Image (cartoon, rainbow, N blue to C red):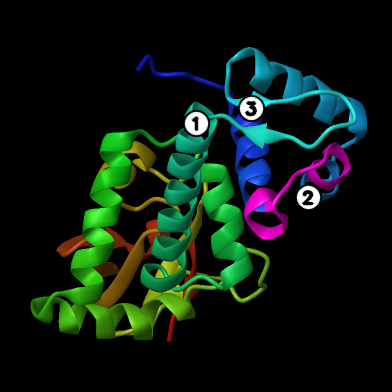
Amino acid sequence: MEKITISSSLEDYLEAIAEIIEEQGHAHTKEIADRLKVKMPSVTNALQALSSRGLIHYQSHSPVFLTPSGAEKAAVIRHRHSALKNFFCYILKLPDTEANDAACKVEHIIGEKVMSRIVLLSEAIATREDCGQLRAYLEQTLPQIRSDDAEDLVSLDQLKEGQRGVVVRVAENLRGLKKFADLGLVNGTLLEMEGTAPFGDLMRIKVMGSSLSLRRCDASHIWLRPTE
């Protein structure tokens, strides 16, 4: 069967139609509009587009039904959303609403090969005995990484020995900005302060499993959120 490609917006409509039919046995245009929080003319245009691609049966003032092709494609979309939501929720430890929102954004741009690898990774972390320590580490560490709107940032030079933090912002006037980016000092990176040199102003930090040194004056341009 020829693969049917549709836009991310039409994928949302197809997913919503499938969900409504599963819940109520039928899907009317108003129900679709309410589910997606869009206006009726937008729903009509989307349904006509899906109908022209053979994914739904649509007639004005009548319930919408999925064709076999539409049902198959909707199932793939819903499975992809569910798998991503589970990954964000149970592996990355995001709250349910935030995990669902992230899944809605990512599901439209991710390829099947990457999707398959995420599913495999999720299953391995969740079920393998040799991932027990990793599960415990994620359970303890990830919830400590909070949203960017909190006002508890500190510069890297203020981090205490043994303390960890997540990079939130790197000032553009940091000397050797590209070099540090290549070493992993970018937004979202978790790092740990290993210590300072007995003499001088060099600081040693652990980034992505490796140790690197930088001067205290450079560290003052890197802002992060402590995790503990």
Image: 85 above or below 143? above
Residue 108 image offset from top left, x and y in percent: 51, 36
The amino acid type found where label 3 is placed reads Ile
- The answer to whether the residues at label 1 and label 2 have Cβ atoms under 8 Å apart is no
The amino acid type found where label 2 is placed reads Arg
Image: 91 above or below 66? below
Residue 141 image offset from top left, x and y in percent: 37, 80
Q: Residues within 10 Å of mark 2 (few under 14, many from 20)?
A: some
For mark 3, what is the residue? 56
Earlier in the chain: of badge 3 and badge 2, it is 2
Give the side of residue 12 with respect to residue 73, left or right.
right
CA gap, disc 1 and disc 3: 9 Å
For mark 2, what is the residue? 35
Give the side of residue 7 with respect to residue 200, left or right.
right
Region in magenta: 20-32
Q: Residue at x 29, y 40 (%)?
A: 114
Give the side of residue 28 with respect to residue 220, left or right.
right
For mark 1, what is the residue? 68
- Element class at badge 3: strand
Quadrant containing the N terminus in the rendered view: top left
Image depth: mark 1 or mark 2 in front: 1
Residue 2, by quadrant, is top left
Image: 150 above or below 223? below
Which one is nearer the viewer's eye here, 148 or 76?
Answer: 76
Give the side of residue 157 with respect to residue 117, left or right.
right
- Element class at badge 2: helix
Which one is nearer the viewer's eye here, 52 or 147?
Answer: 52
CA gap, disc 3 and disc 2: 17 Å
Residue 228 image offset from top left, x and y in percent: 43, 86
